[in-house]
Amino acid sequence: MPMDTSGKIASHVMIARVWIDGGFGVDAGVASTVSADWVAVSLVTRNHNAPASQNSPASAAARTVAGMAVRECTARDHDGGRCRAAVADGAPISLCTQHLLVAHDWIVRDVGVTDLLPSPCLACGSRTGIRYPTGWICAICEWRVGELPDGETEPARVDVVYYLRWRDRIKIGTSGNPRGRLAALPYDELLAFERGDRRLEQRRHAQFAGQRIPGSEWFRVNDELLAHVAELRVDEPWDQYHRWVSRAVALRG
């Protein structure tokens, strides 16, 4: 049964993208003058019904230089002309460095490259972003980097109820500035955030009153409280909080 050509192209181009990211980083702009179609056409023109041995990297076109066989880039243009430059050392597919960069640029148009932002996101404060040819977006709140001018937008207040574990007890508290509040508290682990203010905090104190340590906001660990925390838990509570802040900024306009 013939292999789906479009799927094969996408797979090979993604392989090139991963390999380039590992060896060259993400600045692949040097290849921008070369058509990305070279990469696609080079794969299409190879016979996908041929035996596997004919389509393997080892069977790529080669030339002899100083008595040694050199693999040649198999990229072709629409007229059928082949690049013939030497295949990059260690390349996972038979493309030269320039065409590997073209493949990288072509795939990141849609999937982007995750990297550190040039500066913290103005909407949520995250340092992680996704880079596209047209610019950056925040990887946490997806706000376009630079869309909020410095000094013109006050941080949005988002009240949360927080759950902290310290030894064999859990603290249930609330704050509109959780990062500052938690920095002043002893704890071993941030278990979860719950969107809400002091009214929600008071309801949770009443809900778990049977395990409350008198005169404090600390509670003995118990199955009911652990079950509640489990319903709230996400992989990264701070990422969740940043999304809430970003939405609050967007709604405020």
Image: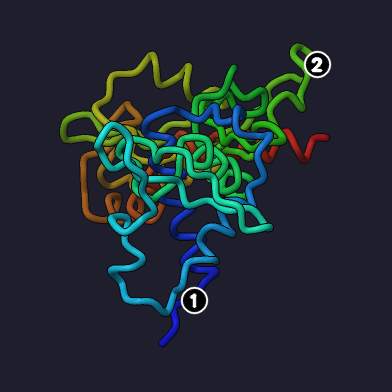
Rendered-image quadrant of the C terminus: top right
Nearer the observer, 141 or 40: 40
Nearer the observer, 144 or 227: 144
Q: Check disc 1: other Cα within 10 Å, few if <14, some if 14-19, many if 20+.
A: few
Q: Earlier in the sequence, mark 1 or mark 2?
A: 1
Question: In x, y percent, where is residue 237?
Answer: 43, 38
Q: Which residue is mark 1?
A: 4
> What residue is at 36 percent from the left and 48 percent from the top?
62
- The answer to whether residue 222 is seen in the rendering is yes
Image: 97 above or below 53: above
The amino acid at mark 2 is Glu
For the residues marked 1 and 2, what is the alpha-carbon distance in whole angstroms? 52 Å
Question: In x, y percent, where is residue 94?
Answer: 40, 49
Q: Which residue is mark 2?
A: 152
Please state if 237 lies on the left or on the right of 196 as rendered: left
> What residue is at 30 percent from the left and 50 percent from the top?
225
